[in-house]
Image (spheres, rainbow, N blue to C red):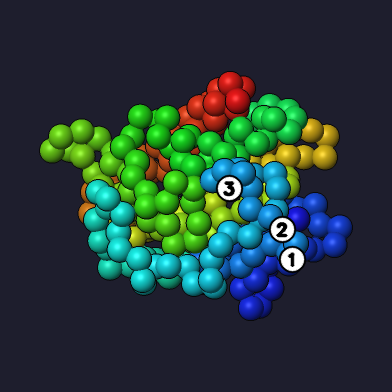
Amino acid sequence: MTRLIGDGRARPAAGSTRSGTGTTHSGAGSTHPGAGGTRPDGPGTPGRPYRDGHDGRDGRHDRPAGPGLRRSSGPNYPDRGATARRPLPDGYHHLHHRAAIGRGQAVFEAAGTAVTTLAMHRATGFSVRADHASVRPGTRVEIDIGFGPLRINAPCEVVWTAYAPDRAGFAYGTLAGHPEAGEESFTVELAADGTVWFEVTAFSRPGVWYTRLAGPLVPFLQLRYARWCTRILRGLAARG
């Protein structure tokens, strides 16, 4: 397990058992696991430390948008990376959902891969586009919600990732044009007793007129989505 230190790098915290920490790659300056790590066999494979191949930049400013991705002018909220810290920032609706999805290393690795490759998100039925097969800080992600003229484009950017022996996942933050303003993280944790936990943490507030008009319906739908992702991930992990 790790903690974030002032220079934006992640370092192991001796004896740490807090579920909200892990090997974290921050979009504010890419960080890496400790020396000696090796890259996993395939993209998005959790459970083994590795070097992610970054050169210290998160790639937000020197990489064109991937196929099908629109360009955006940047984050539409000021608290970038705050899902990696506690307490969550004031002025937003907060969401915290945590559920057991299985047991054992195989379930953890399958679930971690489904999260970090966005397979879980795609299994919800929404259209999901990203410019990396496996998420890293700076990865652009777009989700289309709805159909036809009622389709809403929701652009996001990954702000940190976690690829640790007992924790895998990421957080993305909303970009200009997203109907909400804030950040959401999706993590999978392998506990000492073998239980695999899935956790969704978010802070958000309305970003456009129609989400402001929707009022408390939006937080309700966000919780429903977190529970839906839990059911999907439990099934994906069970199938391996």
Badge 1 amino acid: Ala
| Residue found 67% across the figure and 35% down from its top | 108
Badge 2 amino acid: Gly
Give the total number of marks visible in the rendering.
3
Counting residues from the start of the chain, the first of labels 3 and 1 encountered is: 1
Where is residue 5? Give x, y as percent.
Answer: 69, 73
Q: Which residue is mark 2?
A: 37
| Residue found 31% across the figure and 54% down from its top | 66
Q: Which residue is mark 1?
A: 35
238 relative position to 155: left or right:
right
Image quarter hosting the N terminus: bottom right
Helix, strand, or loop for circle 3?
strand
Counting residues from the start of the chain, the first of labels 3 and 2 encountered is: 2
Seen as rendered, the residue at the extreme right is 15
Q: Do the residues under discs 1 and 2 have CB atoms within 8 angstroms? A: yes
133 relative position to 200: left or right:
left
In this rendering, the label closer to the viewer, 3 or 1: 1
- Give me the disc on residue 169: 3
Question: Residue 176 is drawn in which quadrant?
Answer: bottom left
| Residue found 82% across the figure and 40% down from its top | 192
Closest to the observer, 87 or 65? 65
Helix, strand, or loop for circle 2?
loop
Decide if residue 240 is in sight here.
yes
| Residue found 40% across the figure and 30% down from its top | 124
Label 3 – label 2 distance at C-alpha? 18 Å
Neighbourhood count class around disc 1 (C-alpha, 10 Å): few under 14, some 14–19, many 20 upward: few
Helix, strand, or loop for circle 1?
loop
